[in-house]
Image (cartoon, coloured by chain):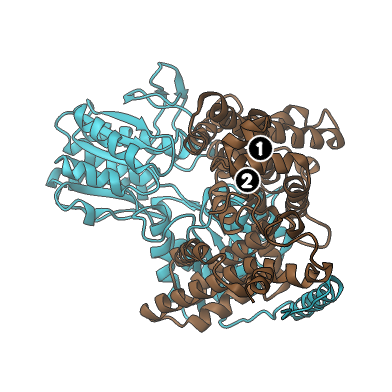
Amino acid sequence: MRLLTVSRRSFLQTAAGGALGVAAGLGPMGRAFAADLTVGIVYVGARDDFGWNQAHAVAAEALKLVPGVKVVEEENVPETDACAKTMESMINLDGAGLILATSFGYYTPFVVDMAKKYPKVEFRHAAPLWNAEKDPKNAGSYFGYLNQAHFVNGVAAGASTTSNKIGFVAAKPISSVLSNINSVLLGARKTNPKATVQVIFTGDWSLPVREAEAANALVDAGCDVITCHVDSPKVVIETAEKRGVKTCGHNASQAPLAPKGFITGAEYKWSTIYKGYAADIADGKTVPNFTAGGYEADFVQNTPFGAGATEAAKAAATGAIADMKNKVPIYVGPLKDNKGNVVIDKTYGNLDPFLDKMNYLLEGVVGSIT
Amino acid sequence: MSTGAPTASEIPRRALGTAKPPSAPADTYDFGSRLRANSEYVVIPAFALLMAALLFALFLLAIGKSPLDFIDYVWKGGFGTAFSFQNTLQRSSPLILTALAVAIPARIGLIMIGAEGALVLGGFAAAAIAVPMVGVVPPIITMPVMVLTALIVGGLWVGLAGYLKYARGVNETISSLLLTYIGIAIMNFFVEGVMRDASNPNKPSTKPIGEAYMIGNIPGTSVHWGFLVGVVVSIALYFLMTRTTFGFAARVTGGNFRAALAQGLPVGRLIVSCAMIAGACAGLAGYFEVAAIQGRANASLAAGYGFTGILVSFLARHNPIVIVPVAILFGGLVASGGLIQRRMGLPDATVLVLQGLIFIVLLVSETLYGRFAIFRPGDAKERT
């Protein structure tokens, strides 16, 4: 019995007709401006990672309170064309007028390309990469000099260590990480001239198993204060807490993870920058292309002291915060690297571009970047 | 799961003496009955997708969200506008090629999951060979050299797993997976070491190859050439695997290794060739990541496309042609995932839950094949 008789030709005709019908239904969708300004924020990881992304997400909450501002957020967006498409989707489907791209690798080529393609949308990226000569005028950078807060960590850690050894779990030997390590050392030397910093590089931004191993190895080597620069410090801080040593945090507040040993932590304060952007837009002004600063601009902060902070550490750290606000330089030259070469010839201001190219560990840091 | 060995419905009925006597009138073997027989492969997956959608709707209701909103956003974010559809096609491009890298070995009975490593190394090799040529050799020569390098490096990388399988009996699933980690480590070793671009201190990468050496988008769209190339390669490999003696020999080997040996088929050469074709596909995906998107090689090449490709290939039952629509479906889900996050306030993992449900339901639906008489016009006639 033949239930169905279809010739190849009629089948193809029907299929083609159907496809055309579907295609006709596709068309550009109007831009919907639901609020005065829609801000699209793109994150590379989870918004509750106890680290880099959480620092931005906390600031985004502050941005949401600004009247007339609507925030749309997308997390776990990799540094591939996915981030370009996410930004484009925020512009085309959500009507975003300001895009905040929060991961380093988003900038070239994705933010630059999108800024060229959508000249009416403002793009700001969280790393000091915008080049006034080469890059589009509707793109820009904002950045916090977190090494100032790491310097404060170092001051508190130096006052807390009894073994004179501070452990540092680092991701990759790139400039911003090296600057944080060196700043911890220089801070620690303020309160404890004998202090050294032992560093272990895990090799990548998020390797929880390696991070736990590194933290354990540092404690075994005699370090009694542990700090770190990895995407999410959760594992490092929890491991150190279990081993009964003190900790200093990084990126966001890890105080809840170490109720006994937490001293303080280096935190970004992106909300200062984000609220500044919102105010500029409300006033009809252009958002600044380049915004960078540290304590003096209220772009970084230290986590409120935890149970691990002694009175001496609190006093020294509070003093160091005041110094940072007054732009007291961290890198007082000449300084040698840990191979004996003079790498910092004179004293540099805390925001000096010379320091952005750092590719060495200072004398007093035990470890190697190669 | 189908290994792609010749099945009863694939082999023309005339060739199967038991299914139809050669003397039977030709009219019962027309396009209509073949369509009915083959529609099983459409109706069952479609039914499975529907079931997965229903299960997912229950999941959404359980967390207090509206399934209708979800469908609306998948449509808007993945297919409903010109921008969204191009977004979907762009995201499906690497998936087509990495899925082919799983499908071709699967046809010869090998489950190889090393596409990620071949993608990363192929992309890295393309960038590495281009960097010293930039500004010296014109793009018209450099670009084919890049493509060729990516094909060869990717092919050799997965081919190695194929050779180990044949020559030493090493499990190809494990070896191809482990080679992936070695491949990523090799790329990191070079981009963080000798090949590192010193002007970019905070993201270890090779030097950029520059706009002139990049391949760009299909004119008039925002979709890069990788999509079109992926479709063409899919069709070419479909014909290779179904219409040539090579493909037939490969599928016979996949169906019964010992029988193939007994028949005198060059089993070793077939296995290594299929593995190399797979690696070349993944290497090509790596080339497009470098030449159409990143403009340089760095850790962003390891974005997981090789692993999503495994899923796509299994859902397409390792059929090269079916891979294209399945990859587009996945591309659409990923493309709309952002809109769903933003509008519904759902975490990124929501789309992963849906993908997981689809995968499981489709695997379960495998057991339904061959159980419905409606798809067996010839059999039904014989019973009556």
State the SS at label 1.
Answer: helix
Please state, as top left, top right, bottom left or bottom right, where the C terminus of chain B lies in the image: bottom right
Q: Is residue A313 left or right of residue B25?
A: left
Structural crowding at the residue carrying mark 2, measured as other residues with C-alpha within 10 Å and reported as few (<14), some (14–19) or many (≥20)? many
Q: Which chain is brown?
A: B
Answer whether labels 2 and 1 touch (C-beta < 8 Å): yes
Q: Which mark, residue B333?
A: none
Identity of the amino acid at label 1? Cys
Colour in which chain A is drawn: cyan
- Rendered residue at 53%/70% (across/down): B48
The image position of residue B50, as x and y in percent, is: 54, 75
Disc 2 versus disc 1: distance between alpha carbons?
9 Å
Q: Chain of mark 2?
A: B
In which quadrant of the rendered view does residue A113 lie?
Answer: bottom right
In which quadrant of the rendered view does residue A65 lie?
Answer: bottom left
- Rendered residue at 76%/58% (across/down): B14
Q: Which mark, residue B107?
A: 2
